[in-house]
Image: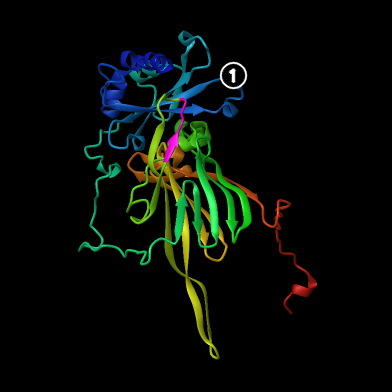
Amino acid sequence: MEFLNVYDLVNVIYDKVPHILKESYDEDVYPSIFNSDLNYGFTPVGTGLLGDINQRKTWFLLTREVPFYELHFLDFGLLLNLASSNLSEWTIDQVWYAGRTYNSLEELDAGYRANTIPKIKVERPTDAQFSSLRRRGKPVPEKPQRAPWPVEPEGKRYSVKQRLVEYLDWSFNFRMSSFTGPLLYDIRFRNETIAYEVSLGEISVFYSGSVPLPQVTNYVDSAEFVGLHSRALVPGGDCPDYATFVNLTFISSFQEELDLIDSAFCIFELNNGSPLRSYTSGDYGYEGMLDSSLTLRSALTIDNYDYIIDFIFHQNGVMETRFLSTGFILPSFLRESDRNYGFRLQEHIIGNVHHHLAQFKVDLDIQGTRNRLEALEFTSVESEDTKVQ
């Protein structure tokens, strides 16, 4: 219901400024903004920026309808005021066009027709394949060669029984939280508890810029239920072919049937190619071994990013967490005022500086539950004893 009202609210573009979109971006909006060669995105404005928890506003921003349209934002948007519970009272508070804001579409149209405001003219791209998945460029190596491939000559050295994994001296249980993502419980090494819980707690992204899209884009992904964005891992792409793949089942309020995600986890052992220890003695010769580790991996697709979360267990009792972001960036239309906030990627496209933050919960139980963490900060201080004579 809400979206239908937003549809009616923004479709006034068709009535009031179709000529501006045609002349500025070579885009038609007939018969309506939603049945044209344009796409769109929403960027909510946080209540912290608005200074009033009762307010609800969002930027409605136009993009071109091409592969990965989020990479092709136009310099045009509407700030929608959606605060009222009476949908008929929703309004357009501001209009963004060519680097400036206007109080209404009427004000923009009047200035445009009178030639008293800055105008922009951007040709429609004839080839937007740079943002597609089509492979381009010269292949490397030129003659196809397969990459090195690991093997398990005597079978797997780990076992998976429902949600319990046992690997050499390690054991742990795992699951996927619909709210926060992957969790590990009862992590043990040589049957001694290392941690009661190690889990992903939150993912957030903060953008920077001087134009509406990056200026107000601050994502806290748990609001979208991180675990529900789990996706199937692809053998040979996301995980080795020989990995063990584990399916995932959710009970979701969004649908009546169970939500089944195939291959939501993968588990595999890998030779890391680096020595776990190595030493050569003139008296006793060489002693050493390569490091092998077990990885539990999951992937979350949240909007334009895929996040890869690894929990890694080494033979020497070291546990490691690794968080990788892949996918594609969320850029904005390049304005001169934004050059201090990013880097030009293509004509009219800037990659804005942004910061990813992943927060993990670690409940340590080493040698019992009475554990504390202390951080020491070292600073250099000049003294008479350290001065060079």
Q: Position of residue 13 (x, y in %)?
A: 34, 17
User: Mark 1: which amino acid?
Assistant: Asn
* Identity of the residue furthest to the bottom in this view: 283
Q: Is residue 373 left or right of residue 273?
A: right
Q: Quadrant of the C terminus?
A: bottom right
- Seen at 26% across and 39% down, the residue is 128
* Identity of the residue furthest to the right in this view: 384
* Identity of the residue furthest to the front in this view: 161
- Seen at 41% across and 60% down, the residue is 156
Q: Secondary structure at mark 1?
A: loop
- Seen at 52% across and 59% down, the residue is 313
According to the picture, the residue beneath numbered tag 1 turns out to be 54
Q: Nearer the viewer, residue 6 or 157?
A: 157
Magenta segment, which residues? 248-253
Residue 207 visible in the displayed image: no
Would you say residue 251 sits in the magenta stretch? yes
The colour mode here is rainbow
Q: In this picture, is 305 found above or below 49?
A: below
* Identity of the residue furthest to the left in this view: 143
Would you say residue 138 sits in the magenta stretch? no
Residue 193 visible in the displayed image: yes
Tally the numbered discs: 1
Q: Is residue 123 left or right of residue 180?
A: left
Q: Is residue 144 left or right of residue 155?
A: left
Q: Position of residue 369 (x, y in %)?
A: 71, 51
- Seen at 36% across and 56% down, the residue is 240
